[in-house]
Image (spheres, helix red, strand yellow):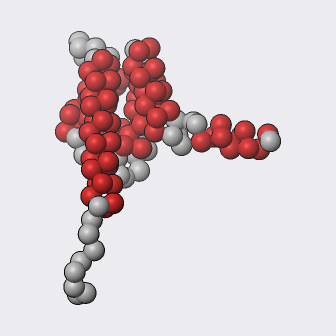
Amino acid sequence: SQQLFADWRAAQSPAANEKAAFAALNAACASSSNKAIRDALITWANHYCAAEIRSMEDLVRMSPSQELTEQAKSLQSTLFNPLSGTPFDSAQLRALTKKLRQAKRVASRRREREVKYQLPSLYKS
């Protein structure tokens, strides 16, 4: 019983669950802690991107979204250049990740429907 609970709990962690990672990213954005946002963004991007994301550099290099790349660069600039006068806009990141997440879900559902209703070929090739 305890092992079952421990397994369930592990499956609910942000590292193992996209929904939990997205919730953690939203919470980090609400806190306005740039380091927490960076860590949560990396965890969420690991679920979103096809490749494994371990750092912001990986995210910038492998992101399928130009907008997400720009947000990642802006966050990095804010973190490592304290003299940059513009603060990081976490609300914009929240809106972008929500939009990307919804678009990925729609595409996934469309793909599932296409596979489900795909007719077998009439002739063997």
The residue shown at (44%, 21%) is 28
- Please state the horizontal and vertical placement of residue 49, each as a whole percent of the image: 34, 47
Q: Quadrant of residue 74?
A: top left
Residue 58 vs residue 40, the one in the foreground = 40
Identify whether 49 is placed above or below 120: above
**What residue occupies the far right of the structure in this picture?**
1
Count of numbered tags: 0
The residue lying toward the viewer, choosing from 52 and 26, is 26
Decide if residue 5 is on the left or right side of residue 105. right
Query: Quick one: quadrant of the N terminus?
Result: top right
- At x 27%, y 50%, the residue is 110
Location of residue 97 with respect to 92 vertically, above or below: below
Q: Nearer the viewer, residue 115 or 20?
A: 115
Q: Quadrant of residue 27?
A: top left
Location of the C terminus by quadrant is bottom left
Residue 24 visible in the shown view: yes
Residue found at the far bottom of this picture: 125
Q: Position of residue 105 (x, y in %)?
A: 32, 42
Q: Is residue 81 visible?
A: no
Taking depth in this image into account, of 43 and 111 the one nearest to the observer is 111
72 versus 91 height, above or below: below
Q: Where is residue 9? Give x, y as percent.
A: 65, 37
Residue drawn at x 26%, y 69% is 119
Residue 22 location (% of width, % of height): 43, 31
Query: Which residue corresponds to the image point at 41% horizontal and 15% vertical from the top-left?
Result: 30
- Which image quadrant is residue 78 in? top left
